[in-house]
Image (cartoon, rainbow, N blue to C red):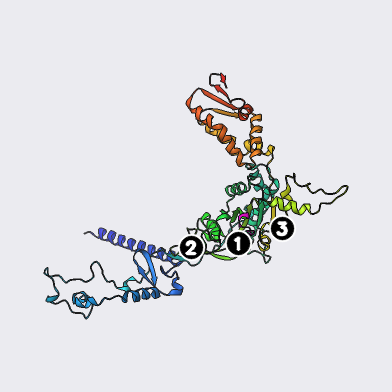
Amino acid sequence: MSDSNKNEDILEDILEEDTSENHNEEDKKDESEYEQVCFVCRRPESKAGKMFRLPNNIFVCDDCMHKTMDTISQFDYQGMLNYPGLMSGFPGMTGSSDKDKNNNGDVPNGFPNISFINLSDLQGDGGIPNKQKLKRKKKDKPVIDIKNIPAPHKIKAQLDEYIIGQEHAKKVISVAVYNHYKRVATDTMDAIEIEKSNMLMIGPTGCGKTYLVKTLARLLDVPLAIADATSLTEAGYIGDDIESVVSKLLAAAGNDADKAERGIIFIDEIDKIAKKRNANNRDVSGESVQQGMLKLLEGAEVEVPVGANSKNAMVPLTTINTRNILFICGGAFPDLEEIIKERLNKKSSMGFNATLKDAHDKEKDILSQVTVEDIRKFGMIPEFIGRLPIIYTLDGLTKDMMVKILKEPKNAILKQYQKLLELDEVKLEFTDGALEAIAEKAMEKDTGARALRSIIEEFMLDIMYEVPKDDNIGKVTITEEYIKGTGGPVIEIRNGGSAE
């Protein structure tokens, strides 16, 4: 072999050693941020001591391993002494004699398919699964740059493109999100600590509470989780634990704890955890849930599972501090209007210019006069209400708002159907009279904007079924007569003709 070939081989060996050392150093760096967790008792290595490493990167602490071996040793293994050949592999033990061999010359084994392993071989390093994060990396730059925070009017302008009306609610939520960003950005910059302003959103069903927050989630770059309070129960009962609300935020942040700690949580149907009236059995989904949520709203460190909604032995836990998480609670609060009317009617009197007893019966915006006392009477405990300092209401939808909802937002229902028929090269139009007729039918159902979709689905069924049959159809116009059942839609053929 020539000298040049030898030099090339030596150089390749050196490069291989360097790369292997670099990989080892990188692996050590990655693993230095984690510590092993016992598969049985879930204690980390810092508390339980050095671990035994089992196949598939499972680790067991010394205490659990000895307890397991003590349990196994209670069984009768004295039959091993009848087969000295089993001990031939151990130091100081003699091999098997001729009388211990069977007809084939093999040593009989009293424990078929069982092999003994050396526990000392199991101790070692390696493997990331089943580990718990020790500490988070310190970041030199701030999490949020205060200069890049969108102003409230910009947030509201984006919400205006999707949501009709509710001006007060959009203004409140825009300011709250803006202040939340600033609070997180200036958390350690000043001695004055800014308290977070959790919100309680009250409005009739179908007025856009959930849709408002979902739209906000699309527009902002902050982690936002939407949870439902109906499934929450007291710890130890069937249902979701209160910490599952935070685990959904952690999942929305990509299991990044630092990112989750500056997120927003919207808890829908919050009125479903009100204190039950005249409840003879234990109230596990009412007042007790409110008591458990107090620490979340105020700010506390809670342990939540990573990658799962419930805690169990197979899922690692991480600690989330809720001090910088903004909570928005929303609910329809049925029968709250009756509580408000009852309070207002107490001021009624007799005589000229007196307040009549039925003066507030036909008032539409009765929810706007809600007070903390009304919410407490509904069934929310004072401690819970005190942690939601901003309370605001959403307006019920009027006929004019219904018509605007049908056609004005970016993803309006009419635009969705027009897009569907465009794919079949058919143009879809609605007359103004048809839109008003749809709004009137929706008002009769009294389920808010949700009724609009069901009504249009009903009238568009035949059209969506018949249009793909005929390639000559070029335009379909939905008329007021068709909505009221006195006529049909106007169908135009591509060559310029029309039919009903």
First reached walking from the N terminus: tag 1 or tag 2: 1
- Closer mark to the observer between disc 1 and disc 2: 1
- Closer mark to the observer between disc 2 and disc 3: 3
- Closer mark to the observer between disc 3 and disc 1: 1
Point 21% across, 71% down: residue: 110
First reached walking from the N terminus: tag 3 or tag 1: 1
Asked whether the beta carbons under mark 1 and mark 2 sit within 8 Å of each other, the answer is no
Q: Which residue is mark 2?
A: 311
On residue 372, the disc is 3
Compared to residue 488, the image places residue 383 above or below, namely below
Asked whether the beta carbons under mark 3 and mark 1 sit within 8 Å of each other, the answer is no
Amino acid found under the numbered disc labelled 3: Val
Q: Which residue is mark 1?
A: 280
Q: Quadrant of residue 196?
A: bottom right
Q: Gap in Å between the C-alphas at discs 3 and 1? A: 27 Å
First reached walking from the N terminus: tag 2 or tag 3: 2
Q: Secondary structure at mark 3?
A: helix
Percent coordinates x, y for residue 94 in the rendering: 18, 79
Q: Secondary structure at mark 2?
A: loop
Q: Secondary structure at mark 1?
A: loop
Of 278 and 14, nearer the camera is 278
Query: Which stretch is magenta?
Result: 271-285
Amino acid found under the numbered disc labelled 2: Lys
Q: Quadrant of residue 2?
A: bottom left
- Residue 132 in magenta? no
Q: How many marks?
A: 3
Point 62% across, 39% down: residue: 409
Specify whether 402 is left or right of 39.
Answer: right
